[in-house]
Amino acid sequence: MTYIICLAFAFMCIFYLMFQRMKGTPMNNRGLHIAVKCAATAMAVLVALLGCLKSGTTAHWILLAGLVACAIADGVLCVHFLAGGAIFALGHVLYMASFVIMRRPNWFSLLLFLALMGLATAAFTRFRSRIGRRYPFFYAYATILSVMVALAAAQYPLYFAGALLFAFSDGLLGYLLVDRNHIKLDYVSLGAYYLGQFLLGLAVYVF
């Protein structure tokens, strides 16, 4: 089974690089762009599915559903940004439900949540004029993301690492939305996202 996980990781990297390369070309085939983007996340879904079939608990199946939601959101985001963001939020809610079932939050979870919300509030205050009417949506999403990471902090380190990478990716993406002068950081943002999702899927398989 280990070789399947290694292959899934290799294909995730291939799909990620393919999508990044295709972004620099005219979108003559939008469907192919979306399919490649979603395929990278699907590798994390595959690993989590293997874990669920091996010895999956209720929490594992819920986390798998969250990964599926995020894979769908990857495609929807390319068509409608706010709808894609809403589906991502659903994925986070499923992650949160999974984490609460596995291990209850502790004091570190609370402190981490407060720290993350402090950072988010400072960032949104600074860039509010650039965000415009989407401010409430973005702030609500940041709150959900902060709760998800805080709950992950009470889990095994692999879950926490995956959640942190997801949060880092979204934070960097949010920065790129208001400051396009650092567009090359998109490679880092998307790479962190895929790696974070894969680690969450791998955690389901390992634990």
Image: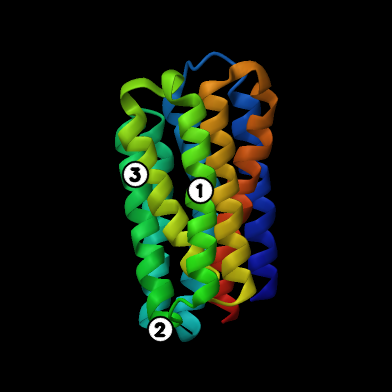
- Disc 1 and disc 3: Cα gap in Å? 14 Å
Q: Which mark is residue 92?
A: none
Tell me if I can see residue 47 in this picture.
no
Where does label 1 land, which residue? 118
| Tag in front: 1 or 2 | 1
Where does label 3 land, which residue? 140
Q: Amino acid at mark 2?
A: Thr
Please state if 157 lies on the left or on the right of 39 as rendered: right
Q: Amino acid at mark 1?
A: Gly
What's the residue at 46%, 38% (across, down)?
35
| Tag in front: 1 or 3 | 1
**Based on the displayed image, in which of its 4 quarters is residue 198 positioned?**
bottom right
Question: Callout 3: few (<14), some (14-19), or many (20+) C-alpha neighbours within 10 Å?
Answer: few
Colour basis: rainbow
- Disc 1 and disc 2: Cα gap in Å? 34 Å
What's the residue at 46%, 31% (across, down)?
125
Image coords of residue 54 (percent x, y): 50, 83
Mark 1–mark 2 contact, CB under 8 Å?
Answer: no
- Disc 3 and disc 2: Cα gap in Å? 30 Å
**Based on the displayed image, in which of its 4 quarters is residue 158 positioned?**
bottom right
In the depicted structure, whether residue 53 falls above or below residue 36: below
Question: Callout 2: few (<14), some (14-19), or many (20+) C-alpha neighbours within 10 Å?
Answer: some
| Tag in front: 3 or 2 | 3
Tell me if I can see residue 95 in this picture.
yes
First of labels 1, 2 by sequence position: 2
Q: Amino acid at mark 3?
A: Ala
First of labels 3, 2 by sequence position: 2
In the depicted structure, whether residue 169 falls above or below residue 94: above
Where does label 2 land, which residue? 57
